[in-house]
Structures are given as C-alpha cells and as structure tokens.
C-alpha cells in the first residue's frame, strides 16, 4: 500500500482496523459562528499537538519515545503530565501513602494549559521537574523547552480536561491488558523505587485500579487512534509517524480543520497554476489548464465518497476484490463560475445529475438567493458543491445552508474549489465542521475589494470569455 493510500485511510476511515490499531472518527475543532477575526497569532506556525493517554505502565512512554525517534528530523518536545502534580501540603505529606496520585485533582491543569498555550504561540517555557521523594516541583531546576514543530503531551489523564483535549491535533490511547500493566508496575516499583511488593499491591487496589476504571478508561472514547500493546506495536507507530509527517507538510489550516484537504502539489500542478494566474494567458490556454486542474480536484473529491467492497471475475477467470463507487451522488454548481466545473464532473461520473444555485453578491456581506434548481431527491444523495473560488465564504455558507435546508446531511457535502482564501476556509469550516473542502491551493488572503490575492482574476469572465478583452 502506497503512502497516499495509507494517508487516505487514516484521514477518511471510521471504525477501521489496521494491523492491530483502531482509528476512531476525528471531530473538527469548530463551532457555528459569524465572521472570524484575524489576529497576529495566526502568523505563528502552529505546532502539531499529540496527546498520548492510557493507564499507568501501559507503554505510553515507549510509544512517545518511538515517535520522537522516527521524527528525528523534526523539532519535537515531550511534555509529561507528571510534571504538573500539585505540591503536597504539610498535612498531605504526613499521609503521602494515602494520597491518590491517579485522581484528576492531583494535577495542576491550569499550569499545564498556560505552558501549552505559550508553546503554541512560539514562546520558550520552563517545565517543572516533580520530585517523587519530596513530592515537590521546586526541588530541581525547571526544564527549559523551546517552541517545536511537534508537541507530545503524555499522561494517564491527559484527555480528562476538555480544554487540554481540545488543543490536540491527534489523540492516541495506549490500550494494554490490566494484568500486563500490573506486572510492569510491580517490576518498576520494586526494582527502580525499592518499594515493598505488598505496598505496591495495596496502592494498586486502593487507588490505581479504581482511578483507571473511573477516570482513565472513560477517556478512551475521545481517542482518534487506539494502540494495543503500546511500544510493541511497530506497525501502528509507523503509520502514525507517516500521518504526522504528512500533516507537518500541509498548510497550517489543514491542522486546524481536519475537514480541509489540499491536493498534493507537484511541479505539474504549480505549472498549471502559473499559467492560469498569468494575466497574459490566452482564453484558450486558460480554459485548457483550468479544466486540467478542475479534473484533478474533482478526482480527489470523489476519493472522499464512501465505497463498498466488490468482487468481480476477470477475463482470466480470476477473482478480483475491489470497490464499488457510491451511486447516490449529484453535483451542484454555484452559478456561474461553478458551471466551469461541470464538464470535469460529468467526465468522471457518467450521467450524474447536476443542480444549480444562483446567489447575488454585493461587496462583503450582501448575499441574496436568486434561483435554485436541485434534484428532488437531493436529500438522499452525496453532494459535490462546485465553485472554483472560495473568497469570503459568505456565498458558500448561503449555498450550503440551502442544501441542508433541503435535507442534505452536512457530512454528505463535499465542497470543491480551485483556490481558497483563509478567511473563506475559516467561515465555512466553523459553520459546517462536518462538511469537507477540497482545494488545490490556499491563497494569501483578500484585498480591500474582497478579491482573492494573488488569485486569478474574475474566473467566470476569463473562462467563458466575457472579460473586457
């Protein structure tokens, strides 16, 4: 299986099993709202944040070490939840053997959040070193940590607080059998910490096991990836690292919105973008290369549709196991630029139904639905929404809202465009976090006239030959 195929599986699969690790659905970080605001922090390169949770002695550290080892060409920092234990009070110190270190209240989550926020904004931080003999965090000098490309948060309860959980791009739960975890804990505490085995077992039955059942295991449902056997599961870790490398090479907005997909750029694609962006390119060449790019976007978009396994008999009498395409789909073009994408869609999907939506736009905020003609059974179909340029996103929101009003599930809509402005991406993804956007390039932004820059001008006029020339 090639790298692209593995990436597609990791991105798109739900409830699939790959060599012993389980991938759950990943939710987008977004909620319904109005226009996004732009701040200086958007210019800071956002790190990829990974959370690694699981029971004590489940193998979390081994998983983290292997990920760091394989990402040796990236700047990676490991932040342990154990560094953020509260200092014990004098009264608690007298009864330290009765203190529950596996309870959420044992951790200073506010300090963890503060340090994480500063790291994400490109600031160096000092992480405390907790001393498990004195139960204090100020015995040893703090560890100085610089901003990094990847932040790994590791701890038994790292998924417990929704604020910490919400900051993660990937959540991994290391799922190891309880007997194995207990055996490891006995070995570790008796050999490394010189503890009596009866004390270890007493602490396990009083605090460790109840806390796992009450607080740690319930957070497993938040995991995107579940790894059985911890660091022994080399296949799962290899796939995770491959996924991280792909994400690190993506636009920062793809890390914020997991429902945003930018097709992999090649010199061919860059060359075609160069031609259609050139103001001196003839109409004939503009249409030719725009059609090629549109075809690529359409093909990529179709790859996000559901499929079913299908077996066929080849002319040699052999059995071939493949997939069957999604049959219930249609296209909807936003008039008139979106109509330029219809031929590519028809070429890929024979006999596909195509609906139309016309929205009148004035400036930044003035949108008015003028016309719509959609298949009567559109609510039962997957919809490919077509518009080559995503600018402010306001027209797109109007069109998507209409589709949802007609009964189309948000998750059944794939929005295809050639170029997208960050503002439009923010607008659409925050309003519709379950919709998918597929584009070929993300632009710098919008000018004072709300035109995409660097852009390619009025796409409809250039494509249909109605520009001034």
Image (cartoon, helix red, strand yellow):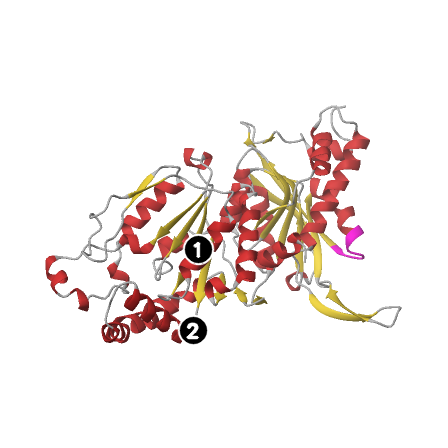
- Compared with residue 98, is residue 349 higher up or lower down, i.e. above or below? above
The magenta stretch is 347-353
Image quarter where the N terminus lies is bottom right
Which residue is nearer to you in this view: 209 or 185?
Answer: 185
- Residue appearing at x 70%, y 43% in the figure: 338
Q: Is residue 336 visible?
A: no
Residue 180: image location, x then y, percent: 40, 73
Q: Is residue 37 visible?
A: yes
Q: Nearer the viewer, residue 35 or 81?
A: 81
Residue tagged by mark 2?
Answer: 177
Residue lying at 55% horizontally and 68% vertically, measured from the top left: 20
- Residue bearing mark 1: 64
Q: Answer left or right for 247 relative to 62.
A: right
Question: Does the stretch in magenta take in 349?
Answer: yes
Camera-side residue: 202 or 246?
202
Q: Which mark is residue 173?
A: none
């Amino acid at each position: 299986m090639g790298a692209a195929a593995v990436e597609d599986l990791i991105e798109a699969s739900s409830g699939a099993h790959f060599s012993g690790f389980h991938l759950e659905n990943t939710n987008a970080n977004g909620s319904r709202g109005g226009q996004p605001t732009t701040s200086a922090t958007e210019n800071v390169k956002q790190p990829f944040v990974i959370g690694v949770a699981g029971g004590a002695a489940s193998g979390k550290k081994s998983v983290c070490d292997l990920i760091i080892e394989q990402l040796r060409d990236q700047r990676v920092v490991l932040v342990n939840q154990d560094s953020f234990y509260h200092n014990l009070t004098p009264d608690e110190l007298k009864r330290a053997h009765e203190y529950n270190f596996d309870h959420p209240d044992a951790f200073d989550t506010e300090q963890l959040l503060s340090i994480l926020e500063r790291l994400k904004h490109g600031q160096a931080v000092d992480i405390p070193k907790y001393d498990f003999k004195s139960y204090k965090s100020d015995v040893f000098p703090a560890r100085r940590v610089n901003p990094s490309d990847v932040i790994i948060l590791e701890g038994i309860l790292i998924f417990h607080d929704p604020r910490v959980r919400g900051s993660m791009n990937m959540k991994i739960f290391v799922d190891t059998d309880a007997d194995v975890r207990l055996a490891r804990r006995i070995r570790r505490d008796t050999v490394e910490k010189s503890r009596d085995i009866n004390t270890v077992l007493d602490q396990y039955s009083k605090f460790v096991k109840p806390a796992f059942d009450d607080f740690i295991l319930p957070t497993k449902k938040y995991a995107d990836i579940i790894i059985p056997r911890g660091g022994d599961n080399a296949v799962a870790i290899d796939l995770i690292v491959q996924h991280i490398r792909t994400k690190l090479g993506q636009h920062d907005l793809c890390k914020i919105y997991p429902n945003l997909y930018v097709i992999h750029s090649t010199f061919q694609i860059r060359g075609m973008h160069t031609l259609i962006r050139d103001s001196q390119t003839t109409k004939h060449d503009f249409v030719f290369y725009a059609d090629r790019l549109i075809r690529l976007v359409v093909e990529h978009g179709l790859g996000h549709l559901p499929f079913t396994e299908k077996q066929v008999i080849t002319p040699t009498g052999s059995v071939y196991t493949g997939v069957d395409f999604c049959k219930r789909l249609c296209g909807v073009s936003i008039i008139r630029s979106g109509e330029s994408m219809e031929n590519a869609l028809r070429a890929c999907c024979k006999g596909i139904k195509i609906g139309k939506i016309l929205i009148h736009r004035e400036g930044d905020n003035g949108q008015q639905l003028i016309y719509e003609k959609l298949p009567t059974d559109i609510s039962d179909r997957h919809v490919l929404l077509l518009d080559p340029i995503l600018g402010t996103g306001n027209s797109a929101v109007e069109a998507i809202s209409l589709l949802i009003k007609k009964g189309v599930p948000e998750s059944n809509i794939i929005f295809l465009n050639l170029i997208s402005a960050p503002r439009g991406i923010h607008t659409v993804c925050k309003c519709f976090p379950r919709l998918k956007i597929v584009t070929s390039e993300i632009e710098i932004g919008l000018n004072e006239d709300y035109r995409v820059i660097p852009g390619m001008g009025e796409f409809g006029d250039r494509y249909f030959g109605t520009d001034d020339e």
